[in-house]
Every structure is written in C-alpha cells, then in structure tokens.
Amino acid sequence: MQKNFKIVDEDGIHARPATALVNTANKFKGAESFAEANGKKVTLKSILGVLSLGLEQGDSIVLSSEGEEAEAALNALSEVMVNEGLGEING
Amino acid sequence: MVKLEGIAASAGVAIAPAFKLEHPDYTVTKRDIQDIPAEIAKLDEALAKSQQELESIKERTRQELGDKKAEIFESHLLILNDPELINPVRDKITEDSINAEYALNETAAQFISMFENMKSAYLQERAADMRDVTKRILTHLLGLTYVNPAEIDKEVIVIAEDLTPSDTAQLNRKYVLGFTTNIGGRTSHSAIMARSLEIPAVVGTKEVVAKVNNGDLIIVDGLDGKVIINPTEELLEQYKHKQKVYQEQRAEWNKLRDEHTVSKDGVHVELAANIGTPNDVQGILDNGGEGVGLYRTEFLYMGRDKLPSEEIQFNAYKTVLERMEGKPVVVRTLDIGGDKELPYLDLPKEMNPFLGFRAIRLCLDRTDIFRTQLRALLRASVYGNLRIMFPMIATLDEFRNAKGLLQEEQAKLASEGIEVSDSIQLGIMVEIPSTAIIADQFAKEVDFFSIGTNDLIQYTMAADRMNERVSYLYQPYNPAILRLVKMVIDAAHKEGRWAGMCGEMAGDTTAIPLLLGLGLDEFSMSATSILPARSLISKLSKADMQELAAKALDMQTNDQVIALVNSLDV
C-alpha cells in the first residue's frame, strides 16, 4: 500500500522531519517502509537515504509500506508528513 | 597587532585570551587485517561509545538550549545507527579484510560528496553533519584524544577552523565568551548556535587559526565582523567601551520588545520589518516588529530554473500571514528587472536597466506571471492581514491596470467558490518622482503609500546607485528628497490614507527624527533595527520633531540637515 504526497515545506525535506520519519518507521518492526521520489526508492529506516532524495518544495513523494503492520505504519508516517508541515496528501 | 575581517555571525563584543580548538589528525591508512571478528568488535565498541557521547550531548543541549537545538543530535544518532552507513562498513571489513577506520572513511566519503553535490544549500550543509559523526567514530577507532570544548574552565575566545554542531553545543557560555572561525557563513550551524547562545561570533575569517597563538588576547567584534589579535592598549580601551555601550543598549532595547512604539509625547507609529522569505519572520518576532512593511517576493523567483507555481507562492504567503498572527503584512508584487535578473525569463540586456523594463512594467506586459502571483496572494489573504503593494508605479494608468487585473482574478476566484478576504488594502511604492509629485491624485485611489527611498533618491538625483563615482549624490537628507517625502505623506493624510517607508532611510537614526516630524505612519526596516528605532522614538517628542522637520525643509544642503539633526540632544 502507498500514499502520494507533495512537499510543501519551503526548505524541502530537512533533518528534523527526516528524523521524525525515520524514528516512526523504526517503531514498526512488522513493516518495511519506503520513500520514492525523483526516480529513486529508499528505505525509511535510513536517514541518509531519505535525505539523499534531495526533496525540494513542490516535489512529489510516494510513501509505501509492506508487511503485517503496513497499514498502521503508513498511517503513522502520513501523520508525520502532515503534522511536521512537510507535505500534503496528493490525490 | 593583527586585524582580520570576517562575517559578523552573532552580535556583541567579546574580549579574552585565545583558546585554539584543534581537531586531531584523522588521517586513515588502509591496512589488511587477519582477525575479522576482532575488527567488527572494535567497530561496535566505537559505535557504542559514540552513541553514549551523543546521548549525553543531546541531553545537555536539551537542558541548556531546549528541544529544538537538541534535534540536530537526534539526527546524528540516526546517522550513527543508519543501516545504509553501517552495513556497507561491515561488509567492507568482512569481504575486503580491511581495517574498520578505512572502511568507515570510504563509506562516509560517498555520503559527504553526495550531500555536497545537492542542489539545495540546506542539504549541502548536511555534509557537515556527516563529517561530524564520522570524526566522532574515528576518534574512538583510532584511540585519539582531543580536548573537549566542554572541559574549558577559564574565560576564553575559541579559535577554530570550523566548529561542528557538537563542538558548539559543548561550549560553556560561562567561559566561552566568543568564538571565531576560518570558515562558515551566517547560516552555518556554528553561526546559528552562536546567536541562540547569545555569544559574539565572527566566522569566515579565512586565516584566524594561522594568525593566532594560544593565549593571545583576542577581540571578537560580532557587530562589524572584525577580529583583533593582541590589540594596542588604546584599541582595547575603545573596544571595552564599545562592549559596554552595546550591553547597556541591548538591555534597554530588550525591555522594549513587547511595547508599542510611542513618541515621548504619546504618538504611536508602527515599526515593521522588511523580509525576503518566510524564514525571516522569526527575526521580526524576536525583535518585537509590529508587522511586515515589505515582503520582497522576488526571492521566490530567484535561485530556481523556472517560475514558481501558484501553489509554491500560496504556501509562502500563507506561512508569513499565519505566523504574523493578524499583524499587517505588506507584500510587494514581483520587482524583477533592473539589477535583479531571472535567467529563465531571457530578458534582453538594457542600456539603463534601472530606467528600463522592470517591476510593474514587466508584470503589466507578462500578465501570465502577474496573474499567477495575484491569485496566490488572494487565496492566501484569508490567513491574515494582507496588504498588496505594486512597485515602480509611474502613472495612475499603471495603477489602474494592475488593480484591474487583481479585480479580474478576484472575480474568477469568487466564481470558483474560493474564499478571499474582503479587507485587503491596496497600495503602491512611491519611488518615482512623477508619482510623488501627483501623490494627491494617487491618494484618491490607493489605500496607502510606501516610499521606497533607495530608488526615489537615485531617480530624483539622477545618480545610479551602483556607480561609485556618483555615490556622493546619494543624499537622503537633501531638502529636495525631504520635500518629496513630505508631499507624499501630506497627500496620504489629506485623503485619510496612511504613508509608510520601506527604504533604508526608514531605519536610519538620522532620518527617523525628521520622518517622525514629517508625520510618517509606518517605518519598515531590517528586523535588527527595530528595537534601536523604538528606543530612539521613545525619546523624541513628535511636536518638537515637526519643528525640526520644518527647519530641515527650508535648508539648502544635505550636510546642513545632518548637522541640524546631530544638534538634537538624545
């Protein structure tokens, strides 16, 4: 399962929200979560991976989760995206 | 005595002996290893020690500087545990039988160069975080020791090539009175930390490390970006005085942060700030600004390879309006052309760019660009107190045409069912003499004026402000300029409108008494000028300044007016 977001934060994705995303992904042992943007897919368990996407304001990003806790993980990640003012749900 | 110039990163003056913070030699050589499990164990131990250190620094930062500043170490901890970093290191050790420090260095170098090659300046600076974490692990792998800045126990100025975030966090404010570095800019970590610690700092001196010996007496002038090594007795006294004056002023200004701006005889004027991006709002709030007097939207258009979308603009405007919580926000529509170019617009070079196709002239021609901006502004208007201002208006027709486009976009939004505020004030910049001269006619149709003095002076004096050979003609206090300013203010008041100023003159301590006397309603300046201006105005009586301004208007030269203002006893 996956969700699409658009980055609305002026600075793109930076260390604080990236940290929050990785911490959240790490909480769900029963799910593997990924971020995909600009033709690159990375695991959300790696902050270096997330930062390496080089996301900027206006970019689209797809978050996806697999595994038995996939739904819960994706919901939690989605909440972080919105609450951190990082992105908005896109379609 | 040696004097160095750098970038003023954090205000204030600090005087103390030098403490050179030098990082040990992290040079790593490649070695073949026999005992792979032992090498992995060595890596794990170094990671564990690094983890403990980071957790204690994070905790300490949280207590001294708050959660927000501690976040950086939260991300360092994640880097330390990042599978994308650590797994390749383990694999290299196991598969290539090489030493842990070499494997780590190789892997980290890839990430560092990845960050350095990123488009965003913010992400480029993350290379520093990667280096910081790598060095921390290497210190343990190589069995190095280095004097931890936390162990400093006498008053010093810290001198360093650069300060890593963890260095800065460990600086004890009680003993570290200031610091100066070879590299860095105003937005580097060390500079940001220095401002939140409120210790004076000068960064980017290029050579301070080479010029200083431990124990040298150092002056760090974070007001003017100067570093003085072993000053003469005379200079030392001067700086001690400067330090005292600054500290007293700072204390006095801080008391005014939450106050209104009121003259000695009880007249309120508004002190607002000029900003370029939503990030600048924090500076206004920290300095007690009463609004945004000029939001220069051209930064949204610069540093990118295409026009910013309506959505990008909407988000920026909305952010500023929301963060200002109902305080007025004057947004200037796109002022591009002149000396500010946009490569992707591919505009032809001009002989006289300042007199050429720029600002509203360009927007009325490229209505596609203009309409997008107007739509974004109108949509954002419901999130705060928006005022829209058109730049470089020379004729009433230009204003009417621009207003017409705004009304068309407003009608379109209404038909789409999108809500727009019904109390948006609409004003113009007054920077062209033709507009100042018939300000009375404009005042019947606009809600406000904001006088842009930098351009008004260059157009009135016919002196290109980029040309140093005619810079003597940049005369803000010339009675010719003051009379134009008076015409604009009087015209506004006659029609019940307000008049502001957003050029450099508005924050200038020589101009403020005159402007108060001329009846200016709003002064918009850089955020750091607000508290000094508020303090100055509180000592001036508007009635007295009216007399002062009347005298100035009758004078003959710029210098005479300066002498008149300097004779004031404040």
Image (cartoon, coloured by chain):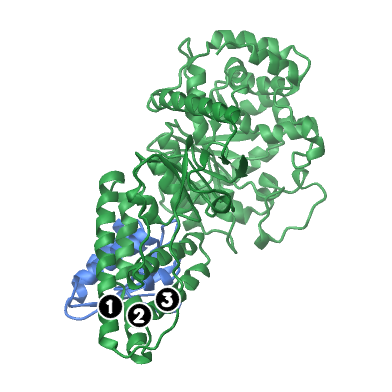
Q: Residue at x 34, y 64 (%)?
A: A18
Of label 2 and label 3, which has the lower sequence position? 2
Name the side, left or right, on which B457 lies relative to B326.
right
Q: Chain of mark 1?
A: B
Please identify the quarter of the rendering in which residue B484 is found. top right
Whole-percent x and y of residue B81? 29, 71
Give the Cα distance between marks 1 and 2: 8 Å
How packed is label 1: few (under 14 Cα within 10 Å), some, or many (20 or more)?
some
Where is mark 3, residue-wise?
A: B105
User: Which mark lies nearer to you, 3 or 1?
Assistant: 1
Whole-percent x and y of residue A71? 20, 73
Q: Residue at x 58, y 46 (%)?
A: B6
Task: Give the secondary structure at mark 3.
Answer: helix
Where is mark 1, residue-wise?
A: B42
**Looking at the image, which is closer to me, B164 or B67?**
B164
Instruction: Name which residue type carries label 3.
Output: Asn
Please identify the quarter of the rendering in which residue B494 is found. top right
Of label 1 and label 2, which has the lower sequence position? 1
Task: Give the secondary structure at mark 2.
Answer: helix
Q: Which chain is green?
A: B
Instruction: Name which residue type carries label 1.
Output: Lys
How packed is label 2: few (under 14 Cα within 10 Å), some, or many (20 or more)?
many
**Quarter that holds the C terminus of chain B:** top right
Q: Chain of mark 3?
A: B
Mark 2–mark 3 contact, CB under 8 Å?
Answer: no
**Quarter that holds the N terminus of chain B:** top right
Give the Cα distance between marks 2 and 3: 9 Å
Mark 1–mark 2 contact, CB under 8 Å?
Answer: yes
Name the side, left or right, on which A76 lies relative to B519.
left
Of label 3 and label 1, which has the lower sequence position? 1
Instruction: Name which residue type carries label 2.
Output: Ala
Give the Cα distance between marks 3 and 1: 15 Å
